[in-house]
Amino acid sequence: MPRNRRFGITGKSCAIGRLYSICRKKKSNLMLAQYVYPSKIGLFRIIRHGRQWRVLREDQEMGRHDTAEAALIATRIACPQARLPGELDQWRYIPELALAHSRVSSEGTHWPLAG
C-alpha cells in the first residue's frame, strides 16, 4: 500500500497540495511597491508589505510602520548620518509591477555572451 494511501491522501488532494505550493512560491516573488534612496551608508528602501511599510537599509530590516511617511520620519531619526530627504517626493518610487518583466526564473537566466 502506498504511503499516501495509508494517511488517507488521495491523488486529488496531492495535486491540490502541489498546486498550492506552486501558487505560494509565485506569490513570494511579487515585486512590491517601494521608495528607494541611495546614501553614503547604504541603500534605503521603504517597501509596502501588506498594510504596513517596511524600512530596509541594504538587506537589514529597520522597522515596520503604518504609513510610508511614518517610516520615513523614523528612518531619518534613526540614521541622521544618512542625510535622507524629508519628503517622499525626493525618493525614487518604483510601482508594484514595474519590474515584473525582469524577474528571474527559478532555473536562472542564461544570457548569451557576445564574442
Image: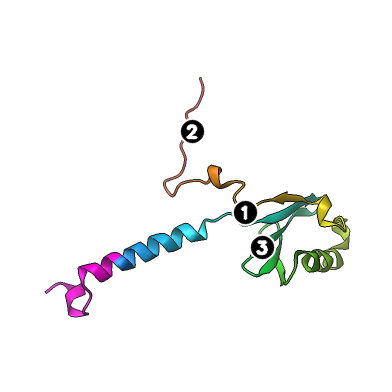
C-alpha separation, residue under disc 2 versus residue under disc 1:
26 Å
Dot 3, how many residues are within 10 Å of its Cα: few (below 14), some (14-19), or many (20+)? many
> Residue 110: horizontal and vertical position, in percent?
46, 36
Q: What element carries label 1?
A: loop
As displayed, is residue 10 above or below residue 72?
Answer: below
Tell me whether the residue at label 2 lies in contact with that at label 1, contact meaning CB atoms closer than 8 angstroms. no
> Residue 2: horizontal and vertical position, in percent?
15, 72
> Residue 60: horizontal and vertical position, in percent?
68, 63
Q: What element carries label 3?
A: strand
The three-letter code of the residue at mark 1 reads Glu
Q: Earlier in the sequence, mark 2 or mark 1?
A: 1
Left or right: where 106 falls relative to 102? left
Which residue position is annotated with label 2?
111
Q: Is mark 2 on a helix, strand or loop?
A: loop
Dot 2, how many residues are within 10 Å of its Cα: few (below 14), some (14-19), or many (20+)? few
Which residue position is annotated with label 3?
48
The three-letter code of the residue at mark 3 reads Arg
Tell me whether the residue at label 1 lies in contact with that at label 3, contact meaning CB atoms closer than 8 angstroms. yes
Quarter of the rendering containing residue 19? bottom left
The residue segment tinted magenta is 1-15
C-alpha separation, residue under disc 2 versus residue under disc 3:
31 Å
Tell me whether the residue at label 2 lies in contact with that at label 3, contact meaning CB atoms closer than 8 angstroms. no
| Residue at far top of view | 115
Observer-nearest of 40 and 12? 12
Left or right: where 74 falls relative to 26? right
Name the main secondary structure of what is drawn in magenta: helix
As displayed, is residue 98 above or below residue 56?
Answer: above
Which residue position is annotated with label 1?
96
| Residue at far bottom of view | 7
112 in the magenta segment: no
Numbered label attached to residue 66: none
Observer-nearest of 75 and 68? 68
